[in-house]
Image: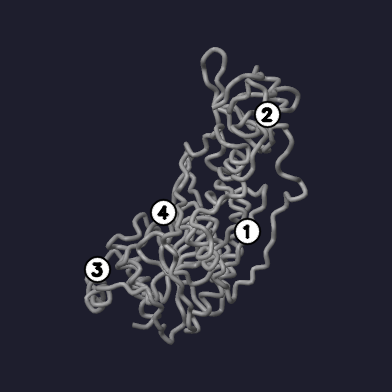
């Protein structure tokens, strides 16, 4: 069936309440029944028609790649599949970043709560794209859904797989103190982030002050270059190199929850600093102040700085700018996989090698204890070193500088956070 006829059928099916279209869809499914018996992860040859791509995306990480594909002269983006519209407390619709791009390029938008439903399966089979591109989407595609595309699906993932499989790879790269990360494109299987690698960036250094938002923005741009090049190769029917992941070296990066923001004061100051960077802008790093009357006050922490036991800064301002790596992605080498083969299974983090001199501490120094609260300084003890909180937001108030907080709240040395 030609692309023009498929799109005409889809247009009518989406806009007509007539039940006859349901029988027409079933007829098409019967004609193509045999192709759904098995799912092959190998790259197959494509048709001679113009290469058609369906994008499945929701969040901001997908935006540069979406724009690159929409501007490409090697493929046609025929549809965006995204999450249904949500509404705020005032009834106003919340437009996701992917939906904004789709509206900008006048793409057909399909809202799907369940990507593996029978109804969507019929919709996607009518569309019958050459490729499904998935990025920052939030749903796992079944074998049947993947089989509706001639080449299956590819996914842009924000890590150097097999490291950090899951919904929050950038968060966990920062949280665990990694000094570099990258992006990978995999050919999708029903297992989460477990498919073979099609392309991968070189290691990209993580700036010591970078938060999740800043790092995701950089990785999204690198990823767009990689996606553009990979899809162009597939559209030209070029041979794509595939490398299976080293599954025994995989690490997980599960989605963060609201409680994930609670500051672990029993960690080192650098680990707490990483915790702050990894939880921006959500769920934010927070703690409880245990007041003298026995009550607790929730405090959300703004920027924090890690200190050693002598209260000297551990991160030099000279290296506060984000590193830049030229996105040489056309012939991406799989250096990360080779490195993993040669490295120990559990390499130590560079942050874990730091040790503070405990002899410099006062005897009353305990994790989570306020060790200085005066002027514009609020310093809290960690298991190793200390943390200087630069801004703070008491429950029900706005974020404020520390000197304003100390003028309005009787917090003092020796008080406990946690």
Q: Secondary structure at mark 3?
A: helix
Image quadrant in which the N terminus is located: bottom left
Give yes or no for contact between labels 4 and 1 (Cβ–Cβ under 8 Å): no
Q: Which residue is mark 3?
A: 22
Corner quadrant of residue 42: bottom left
Give yes or no for contact between labels 1 and 3 (Cβ–Cβ under 8 Å): no
Residue in the picture at 42% in, 60% down: 248
Corner quadrant of residue 279: top right
Give yes or no for contact between labels 3 and 4 (Cβ–Cβ under 8 Å): no
Give the Cα separation between the discs numbered 1 and 3.
45 Å
Q: How many marks?
A: 4
Q: Which residue is mark 1?
A: 218
Give yes or no for contact between labels 2 and 3 (Cβ–Cβ under 8 Å): no
Give the Cα separation between the discs numbered 3 and 4.
23 Å
Q: Secondary structure at mark 4?
A: loop
Image quadrant in which the C terminus is located: top right
Q: Which residue is mark 2?
A: 359
Q: Is residue 21 left or right of residue 332?
A: left
Tell me residue 395's x, y (percent): 56, 27
| Disc number placed over residue 84 in the picture, else none | 4
């Amino acid at each position: 069936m030609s692309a023009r006829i498929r799109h005409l059928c889809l247009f009518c099916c989406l806009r007509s309440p007539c039940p006859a279209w349901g029988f027409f869809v079933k007829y098409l499914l019967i004609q193509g029944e045999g192709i759904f018996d098995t799912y092959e992860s190998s790259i197959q040859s494509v048709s001679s028609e113009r290469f058609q791509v369906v994008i499945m995306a929701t969040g901001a990480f997908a935006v540069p790649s979406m724009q690159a594909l929409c501007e490409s002269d090697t493929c046609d983006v025929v549809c965006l599949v995204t999450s249904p519209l949500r509404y705020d407390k005032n009834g106003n619709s919340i437009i996701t970043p992917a939906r904004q791009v789709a509206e900008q390029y006048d793409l057909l938008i399909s809202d799907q709560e369940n990507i593996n439903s029978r109804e969507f399966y019929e919709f996607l089979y009518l569309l019958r794209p050459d490729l499904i591109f998935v990025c920052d989407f939030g749903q796992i595609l079944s074998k049947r859904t993947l089989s509706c595309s001639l080449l299956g699906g590819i996914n842009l993932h924000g890590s150097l797989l097999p490291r950090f499989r899951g919904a929050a790879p950038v968060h966990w790269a920062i949280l665990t103190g990694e000094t570099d990360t990258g992006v990978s494109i995999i050919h999708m299987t029903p297992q989460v982030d477990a498919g073979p690698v099609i392309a991968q960036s070189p290691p990209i250094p993580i700036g010591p002050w970078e938060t999740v938002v800043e790092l995701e923005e950089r990785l999204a741009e690198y990823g767009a270059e990689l996606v553009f090049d990979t899809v162009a190769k597939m559209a030209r029917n070029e041979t794509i190199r595939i490398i299976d992941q080293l599954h025994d070296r995989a690490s997980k990066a599960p989605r963060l929850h609201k409680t994930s923001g609670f500051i672990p004061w029993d960690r080192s100051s650098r680990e707490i600093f990483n915790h702050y960077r990894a939880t921006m802008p959500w769920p934010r790093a927070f703690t409880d102040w245990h007041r003298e009357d026995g009550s607790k006050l929730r405090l959300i922490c703004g920027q924090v700085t890690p200190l050693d036991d002598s209260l000297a800064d551990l991160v030099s301002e000279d290296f506060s700018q984000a590193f830049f790596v030229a996105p040489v992605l056309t012939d991406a080498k799989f250096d990360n996989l080779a490195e993993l083969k040669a490295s120990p299974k559990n390499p130590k983090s560079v942050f874990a090698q730091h040790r503070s001199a405990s002899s410099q501490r006062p005897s009353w120094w305990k994790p989570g204890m306020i060790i200085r609260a005066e002027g514009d300084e609020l310093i809290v003890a960690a298991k190793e070193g200390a943390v200087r909180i630069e801004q703070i937001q008491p429950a029900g108030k706005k974020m404020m500088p520390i000197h304003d907080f100390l003028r309005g709240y009787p917090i003092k040395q020796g008080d406990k956070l946690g």
